[in-house]
Image (tube, rainbow, N blue to C red):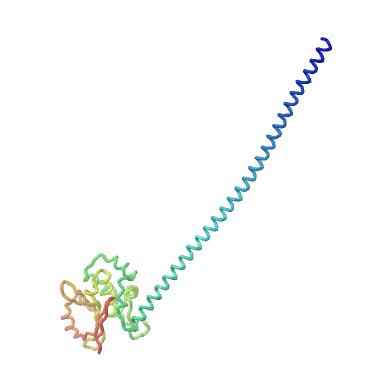
Amino acid sequence: MDIKRFKILIILLMIITSILFSGYIIRYRQYSNSLSQQNYLENELINYDEEKSNLENKIESIETNINVENENIIDLENKISKANNNINQLKEQIDVYQKLKTNDMTVFVTPNNEKIKSFVNQIDTDDPVNIYRFVRDEIKYLEDYLTYDYRFEYWQFPEETLTLKTGDCEDQAILLCTLFRAKGYTPEEVKIAFGLTTANTGHAWVELFYQGDWIVFDPTSSSSAYMEKTRYYSLINVNYKGSFNDFYYEVIPN
């Protein structure tokens, strides 16, 4: 091999080596850039995960606060509802008191009372005789002075009489009239009457328009059923003083 060809070969080798080295450098830089981009993306991914975790924690905290606030709202609504119920009960008591001040006896007949309605729903008959017999047999006659620390006179509400299972004539009459009303008898069909007997003692009973005539149910009587009104009045020689139900009341002045 002559010197000229050798030089050419050397030059070619140098050129090839230079090309290969340049390619290596380019590929190295590309790989280095790729590594840098990968590290950048990994760091970005780590930051994203941290931000996501922080955001999830914030969302969880917000949801917890919302649940707590919802519970507080529910608790407040319950308190408001209870307060409104107390206010309504107080208004009802004030209304009852105002009516009692004017001798309005309609407040004692309470067919819409929850305890009365619940009890009436358990009575599977509309027969007034059977309802009368319940009051007569299940409510024990007891004078007011024995129940209320020797107070001379006390009228019980029907729900009180149901609870105590005791009561005198007007207590039992009020309960019976209330049960009749709760069973669907109209105010024009049933009322509590009261007056003085031959012994000049006060007495109360129930009058019901039944089977085309006014009849008397007297829960404190030993009678097993009812009695025609005229016969009852003549029997006890009653001096009628008035009557009432939950819609009207009448008092005959002395």
Against 151, residue 13 (above or below) is above
Q: Quadrant of the N terminus?
A: top right
Looking at the picture, how far across and down is residue 17, in whole percent?
Answer: 76, 22
Q: Quadrant of the C terminus?
A: bottom left
**How many marks can you see?**
0
**Above-or-below relation of 22 to 126:** above
**Left or right, residue 16 beside residue 156:** right
At 21% from the left and 88% from the top, the residue drawn is: 198
Q: x and y percent of residue 103 in the render?
A: 31, 83
Coordinates of residue 62 in the picture (x, y in percent): 56, 56
166 above or below 53? below
For the residue pair 65 and 228, the one nearer the viewer reads as 65
Q: Does 168 sit above or below residue 182?
A: below
Quarter of the view holding residue 154: bottom left
Quadrant of the image occupied by residue 221: bottom left
User: Which residue sits furthest top?
Assistant: 1
Name which quarter of the figure residue 116 lies in: bottom left
In this rendered view, identify the residue nearer to me: 129 or 243. Answer: 243
Location of residue 212 in the rendering, given as x and y in whole percent from the top left corner: 15, 73
Q: What residue occupies the far bottom of the structure in this picture? A: 254
